[in-house]
């Protein structure tokens, strides 16, 4: 089946530093990647949508200069949290459209990244 | 505004019983619907999807769709403690649009 590999699974960083999260589609071409954030006991919140080779579309209220998304190839998308602060601590999950999971409408999730900013 | 509504729960059922999870959606243009299971601290995993009116069965799981009522449900037969998780309902409309997720229903299966 379709697999999206997400790394790192956990990261702790100091306030003010930047963190890069990678998502790779292992056996299919991910034409579109969605990035979500999830706070404890809350639902998934869509942050942005990126299509390979074009600029990401950010949801209202998400700072594009703080959450940099790069989708330079059909198998790799990255999210960089710049100048991270404690309030950015969250669970970040990518989801790729493509592949065979769920049939023609496949949306495959990465395993998530737990970011803690201290 | 496209919305997917779910009862947040928690829904508690005894082991071996049928758990019934419900979901309504606002966008009549939604084409297909997904049920995901999410364990605490983990990423959502797909249980099944449905796009035609009626029932779709997969093992212990049955998804039901009623487009006229804009209603989707998931039945879990012979519930097990390992089924205890949050269940997310999601709707898909068209193209490369993101899934619209509900807030999830927390299910607790009591041994």
Image (cartoon, helix red, strand yellow):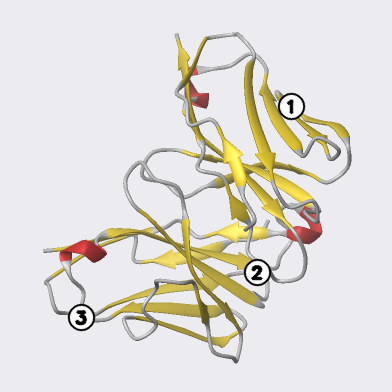
Instruction: Please tell me whether residue A66 is drawn above or below residue B35 in the rendered image.
Output: below
Instruction: From the image, state whether disc 3 or disc 1 is nearer to you.
Output: 3
Residue A114 percent coordinates (x, y)? 30, 57
Residue A68 percent coordinates (x, y)? 39, 83
Viewed as shown, does residue A28 lie left or right of A72?
A: right
Closer-to-camera residue (A118/B60)? A118
Is tag 2's residue or tag 3's residue first in the polypeptide sequence?
Answer: 2
What residue sits right under mark 2 in the picture? A27
Q: Residue at x 73, y 35 (%)?
A: B72
Quarter holding the N terminus of chain B?
A: bottom right
Work out how far the residue at label 2 is from the one at label 3, CA to CA, in angstroms.
Answer: 33 Å
Question: The residue marked by circle 1 belongs to what chain?
Answer: B
Question: The residue marked by circle 2 belongs to what chain?
Answer: A
Viewed as shown, does residue A57 lie left or right of B110?
A: right
What residue sits right under mark 3 in the picture? A83
Q: Residue at x 65, y 59 (%)?
A: A107
Quarter holding the C terminus of chain B?
A: top left
Do labels 3 and 1 touch, CB within 8 Å? no
Task: Please tell me how crowded label 3 is: few (under 14), some (14-19), or many (20+) other residues with Cα within 10 Å.
Answer: some
Q: Residue at x 21, y 74 (%)?
A: A84
Q: Residue at x 67, y 17 (%)?
A: B77
Instruction: From the image, state whether disc 2 or disc 3 is nearer to you.
Output: 3
Do pointers 2 and 1 mark residues of a single chain?
Answer: no
Closer-to-camera residue (B85/A62)? A62
Work out how far the residue at label 3 is from the one at label 1, CA to CA, in angstroms.
Answer: 47 Å
Instruction: Please tell me whether residue A39 is drawn above or below residue A85 in the rendered image.
Output: above
Task: Please tell me how crowded label 1 is: few (under 14), some (14-19), or many (20+) other residues with Cα within 10 Å.
Answer: few
Work out how far the residue at label 2 is from the one at label 1, CA to CA, in angstroms.
Answer: 26 Å
What label does residue B59 carry, if any?
A: 1
Image-quadrant location for residue A87: bottom left
Viewed as shown, does residue B28 lie left or right of B14?
A: right
């Amino acid at each position: 089946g379709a697999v999206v590999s997400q790394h790192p699974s956990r990261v702790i960083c100091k306030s003010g530093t930047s963190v890069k999260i990678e998502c790779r589609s292992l056996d299919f071409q991910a034409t579109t990647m969605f990035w979500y954030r999830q706070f404890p006991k809350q639902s998934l919140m869509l942050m942005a949508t990126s299509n390979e080779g074009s600029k990401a579309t950010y949801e209202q209220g998400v700072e594009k200069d703080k959450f940099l998304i790069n989708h330079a190839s059909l198998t790799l998308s990255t999210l960089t949290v710049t100048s991270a602060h404690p309030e950015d601590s969250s669970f970040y999950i990518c989801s790729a459209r493509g592949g065979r999971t769920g049939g023609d409408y496949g949306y495959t999730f990465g395993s998530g990244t737990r970011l803690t900013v201290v | 505004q496209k919305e997917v509504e779910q009862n947040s729960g928690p829904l508690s059922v005894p082991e071996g019983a049928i758990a019934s999870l419900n979901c309504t959606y606002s966008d009549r243009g939604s084409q297909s619907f997904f049920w995901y299971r999410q364990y605490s601290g983990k990423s959502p995993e797909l249980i099944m999807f449905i796009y035609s009116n009626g029932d779709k069965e997969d093992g212990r799981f049955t998804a039901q769709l009623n487009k006229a009522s804009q209603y989707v449900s998931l039945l879990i037969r012979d519930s097990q403690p390992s089924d205890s998780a949050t269940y997310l309902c999601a709707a898909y409309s068209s193209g490369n649009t993101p899934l619209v997720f509900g807030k999830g229903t927390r299910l607790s299966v009591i041994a």
